[in-house]
Amino acid sequence: MEQTFTAAGNPIVRHVFTSDPCALVHDRRLYVYTGRDEAPIGHDGYVLTEWLCFSTPDLLHWTAHGVPLRPTDFAWATGDAYASKVVEHGGRFYWYAPVTHATIPGKAIGVAVSDRPTGPFRDARGSALITNDMTSAAGSVRADDKDDIDPTVLIDDDGQTHLFWGNGRCYHARLAPSLVDLDGPIAVVDLPDFAEGAHIHKRDGWYYLAYGYQNPEKVGYAMSRDVDGPWEFQGVLNDVVENCETNRAAIVDFRGKSYFLYHNGALPTGGNHRRSICMDELHYNPDGTLRRVVMTAAGVAAVAAADERGGPP
């Protein structure tokens, strides 16, 4: 059931705990997909059983679209809705979702698909795209079977699709034109102090790879002229957030401006496992580097909603 609300300031969503945002623009509307933090007060651990979808035409008036996907929508998974990524291609929407595999130890990445940005989404493969044994073969550095989380996807200007993901080590692989199969080997990306939470985007010929950096996590970022690297580390993009040790960046252009989404633990009873998504403006320097994000309680200003005549996305 859809629910409308007004969001003035950060955190954006206040009626439920939300985490790990990703974002896309479709038909001049911004869609934000999040996890839902369900950990009880005082519980020291994640409880993540579903993903949520929110949208807005103007950054002020929002619609909550309910639960378009759950980990258990993958018949081969047992649960755990970790940080995910949704992209649009060919009029369809592809959701790259890390979950716990039922038969292969560890996390795995599945792909769900829908004809609408709000779903419902269904398993596009009937099996996992990435499993823990695949990254073990690529040189995993973790002992807790959580290599394969936090996917991010870029559909490049030449049509080639790239998948980045990881925990403790960043991985990169190309996807086939179907977007639901790999098209080549898994490579390891050399990034300093990579923790998790990768986000890839491209602007003016530069590739930007933001990620959870150190612990507690800041967001650091690297740049490259080639998606295969080498990547040059540029420093900290976002500092440690309020009352939370993790962070996950999402970067999106909307109505002629750039925005940075993240989460913190600022709501009453919030914290490491009861997080809330926020949004502030992102600015580029003339040389293409990024200015450090200024996190605010005020958040972002509303923009004029596009009418049927169009306007900037």
Image (cartoon, rainbow, N blue to C red):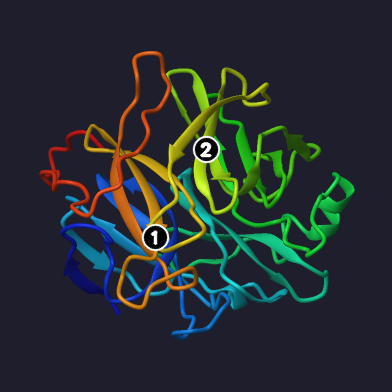
**Residue 40 horizontal side relative to residue 226, left or right:** left
Between discs 2 and 1, the one toward the N terminus: 2
Q: Label 1 is placed on what type of residue?
A: Asn
Q: Where is residue 218 in the image (x, y as percent from the top left)?
A: 50, 46
Q: How crowded is mark 2: few (under 14 residues within 10 Å), some or many (20 or more)?
A: many
Q: In the rendered image, which quarter is residue 145 located in?
A: bottom right
- What is the quadrant of the C terminus in the image? top left
Residue in view at x 59 percent, y 73 percent = 71
**Residue 181 horizontal side relative to residue 87, left or right:** right
Residue in view at x 76 percent, y 76 percent = 102
**Residue 110 horizontal side relative to residue 13, left or right:** right
Q: In the rendered image, which quarter is residue 281 located in?
A: top left
| Front one among 37 and 127 | 37
Q: Where is residue 62 in the image (x, y as percent from the top left)?
A: 21, 62
The residue that disc 1 covers is: 264
Q: How crowded is mark 1: few (under 14 residues within 10 Å), some or many (20 or more)?
A: many
Q: Which residue lies furthest to the top in this view?
A: 287
**Could you tell me how far apart the alpha carbons at marks 2 and 1 are, in whole angstroms?**
16 Å
Q: Residue furthest right?
A: 137
- What is the quadrant of the N terminus in the image? bottom left
Q: Label 2 is placed on what type of residue?
A: Gly
**Cβ atoms at labels 2 and 1 below 8 Å apart:** no
**Residue 285 horizontal side relative to residue 218, left or right:** left
Q: Judge whether 117 appears above or below 291 on screen.
A: below
Residue in view at x 63 percent, y 24 percent = 231
Please give the label number shown on residue 220: 2
Element type at marker 1? strand
Residue in view at x 81 percent, y 38 percent = 185
Q: Position of residue 137 (x, y in %)?
A: 89, 48
